[in-house]
Amino acid sequence: MQGPMVDWITSDGLTDYRQAEEWMEIRAGQIALGQAPECIWLVEHPPLYTAGTSARPSDLTDPDRFEVFETRRGGQYTYHGPGQRVAYVLLDVGARGRDVRAFVQQLETWVIAALAQFNVTGHIREGRVGVWVERPDKPAPTGHQHAEDKIAAIGIRLRKWISFHGLSINVEPELEHFSGIVPCGITQHGVTSLVDLGLPVTLADVDIALRHSFEQVFDSPTRIAPQPNSG
C-alpha cells in the first residue's frame, strides 16, 4: 500500500541553523498531532559545525573557525556549509513501522539510490555512520583494502515517533572546511563530494535525484510545498 503524500520543500539561499531547528521542532509537533503532513525540507546552511549527542570535545580541532551548534540529534561532529545539500526528514516513523533501525536503513538506501543516478556507488560500513565511496586513486589506510571517503552524513532524532534532522550530501562544499573537526569521530578516512569525484553536478541535479529516489524507497508520493515563512 502506498504511503501518504509528503510535502517536498526547498529553501533558496542559506538557511540559519537555529531557525531551521526551531521550524523543525514546530513542524514535528504538528505532524505528531495530525495537524500537518510529513515533509522533506531541503536547505543549504552557512559554514558551521554541529555537535551530536555523542560528540567528543577532542574531535573539535579548530573550535574558533566556525560557529558550533550543540544539537540533540544522534552522532558526533559534522560540518554544514554552502555546496552541501541538507535534507531534513520529518516523517512519522510510528506510522511507518516503528522500527528505528529499519528507518535508518531506508535513509541509507535513499542516499545510495540518489547517488546511483550519477553512477556513484555508495557503501554502508559497519561501525561507520553515513555513506562512503571507494577511492582507488588514493592509498589505502593500514588494515583496509581500499581508501574510502565519506560523501553523505546521517543523523536523526525522534520525538513521539516523528523524525527530524536528517542527512547531508556533499555536492560541492569547500572540503577543507571539514579539517576543523574529526567528522563523525573517524580519522582513518577522508571526505569527498560529487564535484571532487569529477562530476559536474549541481544542487538542483541532486534535488531531482533525491525526490525521485525518495518516492521509490519510501513508497510515498511527494508534492511541492512552499518554503517556511513564504506563505
Image (tube, rainbow, N blue to C red):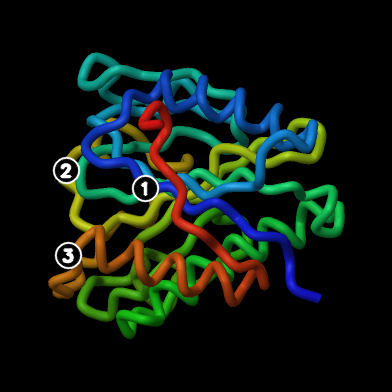
Q: Who's the residue at 66% across and 45% down the image?
A: 37
Q: Which residue is mark 1?
A: 10
Taking the image as shown, residue 148 lies to the left or right of residue 195, namely right
Q: Which mark is first along the chain, 2 or 1? A: 1
Q: From mark 2 to mark 3, how far is it between C-alphas?
A: 12 Å
Name, please, the residue furthest toward the top: 64
Q: How many marks?
A: 3
Taking the image as shown, residue 214 lies to the left or right of residue 168, namely right
Q: Residues within 10 Å of mark 3 (few under 14, many from 20)?
A: some
Q: Residues within 10 Å of mark 1 (few under 14, many from 20)?
A: some
Q: From mark 3 to mark 1, how far is it between C-alphas?
A: 24 Å
Q: Who's the residue at 35% across and 42% down the image?
A: 43
Frontmost of labels 1 and 2 is: 1
Does 35 appear above or below 203?
above
Q: Which residue is mark 2?
A: 176
Q: Which mark is first along the chain, 3 or 2? A: 2
Q: From mark 1 to mark 2, how far is it between C-alphas?
A: 26 Å
SS label for mark 1: strand
Q: Amino acid at mark 2?
A: Glu
Q: Which residue is mark 3?
A: 196
Q: Position of residue 152 (x, y in %)?
A: 41, 57
Where, quadrant-wise, is the N terminus in this rendering?
A: bottom right
Front residue (pair 210, 128): 210
Q: Amino acid at mark 3?
A: Asp
Q: Which mark is first along the chain, 1 or 3? A: 1
Q: Who's the residue at 40% across and 26% down the image?
A: 229
Q: Position of residue 201 (x, y in %)?
A: 19, 69
Front residue (pair 124, 211): 211
